[in-house]
Image: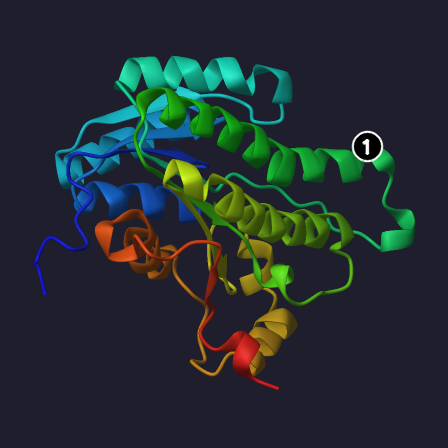
Amino acid sequence: MESNLFSVAGKTALVTGGGRGIGLAIAKGLAEHGADVAIVARNKKQLEDATRQIHTDTGRKIWPFPFDLGSIEGIEDFFETVAAETKGIDILVNCAGTTIRGPSEDVDLKTWNQVIEVNLTSAFVLSQAFCRHRKREGKAGRIINIGSLTCHAARPTTAAYASSKGGLLMLTKTLAVEWAKYNINANAIGPGYIATELTEPLWTDEDFNKWVMSKTPLARWGRPEDLVGTAVLLASRAGEFITGQIIYVDGGWLALL
């Protein structure tokens, strides 16, 4: 097997939610495998810290782009700015996300729309801009959407989140089928329970932690770095015949009855 099968050298990736957690781990992982990376997040300080960290660890070129993906109307222009500054985007990772928990009967429309717009609509609009860009360039592209266990299974109090992630999975499949003619592969990664700053209220809750452990055959929470190998596979030549799929990285959570 060729040693460079999993290399993304010469490619440029755009990773949303790249300032921390899963997005940061994937951005760094792609850089470690040769890509230059543009990272997007709302928090400018977070982005600056992440940029320094990735560049110091990998030596790759890293661009920080502060932007609120809830501003749907501005996404297309934002993408064109990023593409111009980086001289082109080959890999798009839609990782930015949010959740607001609450009983389904109490979820107001404003909350519902906020979660759907950030988790699903922004990924769609950004993917549209990416597709138009790759068509103009006449080059192939890779889209990697970060899904969730709720692409497959539901939990109480997550109606908006689960709906957004279920929609993201079907969006992934649809784009894979429709954009194959442009040599754009679209896939998703479904993380299990990953210990991050965002999920700290869950993994520090004794009862919830016991429940996760009881449901996870590998008997631990995942780490953001656990998703890097799958992302590199889907972004590299090793994944060129994979499209329309979701790969769950969940420690066996979905396999346990």
- How far from the left and from the top, in percent, is residue 151? 62, 59
Q: How many marks?
A: 1
Q: Residue furthest front?
A: 181
- In which quarter of the view is residue 202 placed? bottom right
- How far from the left and from the top, in percent, is residue 207? 64, 74
- In which quarter of the view is residue 136 placed? top left
Quarter holding the C terminus is: bottom right
Residue shown at 22%/40% (left/top)? 31
Amino acid under disc 1? Lys
Q: Label 1: few (<14), some or many (≥20) within 10 Å?
A: few
- Compared across the picture, whether 51 is left or right of 181 comes to left
Tell me the residue that label 1 is attached to: 110
Instruction: Decide: is 246 above or below 37.
Output: below
Disc 1 secondary structure class: helix
- Compared across the picture, whether 233 is left or right of 116 comes to left
Residue shown at 49%/47% (left/top)? 176
Q: Residue furthest right?
A: 105
Residue shown at 25%/49% (left/top)? 236
Residue shown at 52%/18% (left/top)? 76
* Front in this rendered view, residue 86 or 224: 86
* Front in this rendered view, residue 188 or 118: 188
Quarter holding the N terminus is: bottom left
Answer yes or no: is residue 18 visible. no
- How far from the left and from the top, in percent, is residue 177? 52, 48
